[in-house]
Amino acid sequence: MKRLIVVSNRVQPPSEEATGNQGGLALALSAVLRESNGIWFGWSGGETESFTGLINFQKSAGVTTATVDLEPQDILEYYDGFANRTLWPLFHYRVSLAEFEREFVDGYERVNTRFAETLLPLITHDDLVWVHDYHLIPLGQRLRERGVANRMGFFLHIPWPPMGLLVSLPNHQELVEQLFAYDVVGFHTQDWLDNFLDYARTHMDAEVDEDGTVRWQGRTLRALACPIGIDGAAYAQTAQSPTALAMCRQMHESANDRAMIVGVDRLDYSKGLQERFMGYERLLATREDLQEKIFLLQIAPPSRANVQTYQEIRAQLDSHSGRINGEFATVDWVPLRYVNKGYARDVLAGIYRAAKVGLVTPLRDGMNLVAKEFVAAQDPEDPGVLVLSNFAGAAAQMDAAVLVNPYSPEEIADALALALTMPVEERKARWRKLMDGVVNEDVMWWLDRFITALDPETATAGPAGAP
Ligand code: F6P
């Protein structure tokens, strides 16, 4: 088995204690990293006055992490700037929110160069290098320029936009050309893959084979759709852990026989929270019979708080939630519980289990793992109903959910009414179908498919290749 080097903007090492806080992706990557004696490289999340390239190595639960601090200007231009003020909105189809500043591009290129220079001495000739997400598209090219000939893969965890939107980025072709430094490029869905192939074919005149092999100016990459999953079986167990069951009981008690609808999202404009609140508001206004019988718990931990669009959405949601409660609450009923805090995985699992409806309505989302976790956390004898946006990557695999157009408050209200009154036999049948998908196409299945494309030998040797 070859050694794996994973590179991502954020590094999430496993903790020595099983706190239940680490996500499925981090757990799966940790398993392969541990097995292959690999390294997880990225930003520490911290800052330093002037970039030194000094690597902080740590070993936690058998996984080696290697992180570097960044300068304030790097964080401003690379992370807050090009990654989250340019690429994030554009790739989530929100061109009008995207900011195109040359200094962001410079900062993005600079940090990718710094990452490449720092990582270079750690790479030995047989390592597999796997780069994750939109923060690090140029990294592969920077490594190739420095003589790295290893197999290198890239995985995009957010949508890839249609060509007509991508071309609004002034340096669009340069960005796409950088992907050709990788041997394998993965997307969550066929839609994102098709958008990429369309651009390569139409805009770059690349040759595209049916199996996703793309040839352009002497370089060949293999592009594939490979939807990420969770560890469905493990999450189902987490939902029955003492912490989760205690939380589930607590929620039932505090619900006081009212049906809980739950949403859990980073506080991000791509998650459709305003439209979701409008849908819920519409349900309350049009279905008086449901008033005082339901409530929505929306958990939305703040995110990327230095970016103005995030400050704006937070202020809008503060005011919107206040308006809903002001209009509909009674002396002993709060229709919307809006919480700006994050919770541990096992606590969330208990909350999901207590809910009648999981409301996952992003306006655009690469995949959305909350949808899968909600399903895995349910009680098979009395499962809650998943209401899912058509525009989440997860919708391609989860057609047994109640699918909605997240821009339409009417559709959201109708879907909620349907879900809240759905007979138990239909809930069970839909849940069974969803759960089979969550368990069969799990995170190990995803990892194995990607690594098989990158290096078949490693895929069958390590835990990623395990059945
Ligand atoms: O899913 C996209 C993503 O950017 C991940 O890479 C990241 O872990 C997550 O969203 C949270 O974003 P951030 O690291 O900016 O808080």
Image (cartoon, helix red, strand yellow):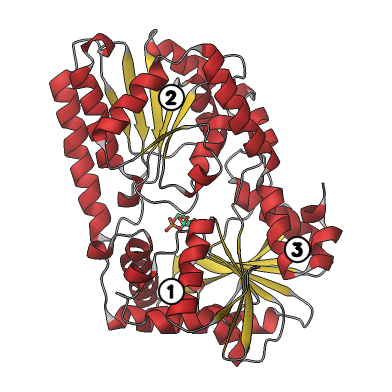
**On screen, residue 383 above or below 394:** above
Residue at 34 percent of width and 67 percent of height: 80
What is the secondary structure assignment of the residue under circle 1?
Answer: loop
Residue at 36 percent of width and 27 percent of height: 415
Percent x, y for residue 327? 13, 22
Percent x, y for residue 41? 61, 69
Residue 52 in sight here: no
In the picture, measured across the screen, residue 9 lies left or right of residue 78, that is right
Query: Based on the displayed image, in which of its 4 quarters is residue 152 positioned?
Result: bottom right
Residues at circles 2 and 3 in contact by the CB criterion of under 8 Å: no
- Give the spatial CA distance, label 1 vs label 3: 38 Å
Please state which of the two labelled residues, at mark 1 or mark 3, is closer to the viewer. Answer: 3
* Mark 2 closeness class: few <14, some 14–19, many ≥20 residues within 10 Å: many
Which one is nearer the viewer's eye here, 257 or 226?
226
Whether ligand 1 has any atom under 8 Å from the Cβ at mark 3 is answered as no
In the picture, measured across the screen, residue 186 lies left or right of residue 330, that is right
- Choose the circle earlier in sequence order: 1 or 2: 1
- Choose the circle earlier in sequence order: 1 or 3: 1
Which one is nearer the viewer's eye here, 174 or 45?
174
Which residue matches tag 1?
A: 48
Which residue matches tag 2?
A: 357
Give the quadrant of the N terminus.
bottom right
Residues at circles 1 and 3 in contact by the CB criterion of under 8 Å: no
**On screen, residue 198 above or below 248:** below
Which one is nearer the viewer's eye here, 218 or 136?
218
Disc tally is 3
Which residue matches tag 3?
A: 452
Dot 1 amino acid type:
Thr
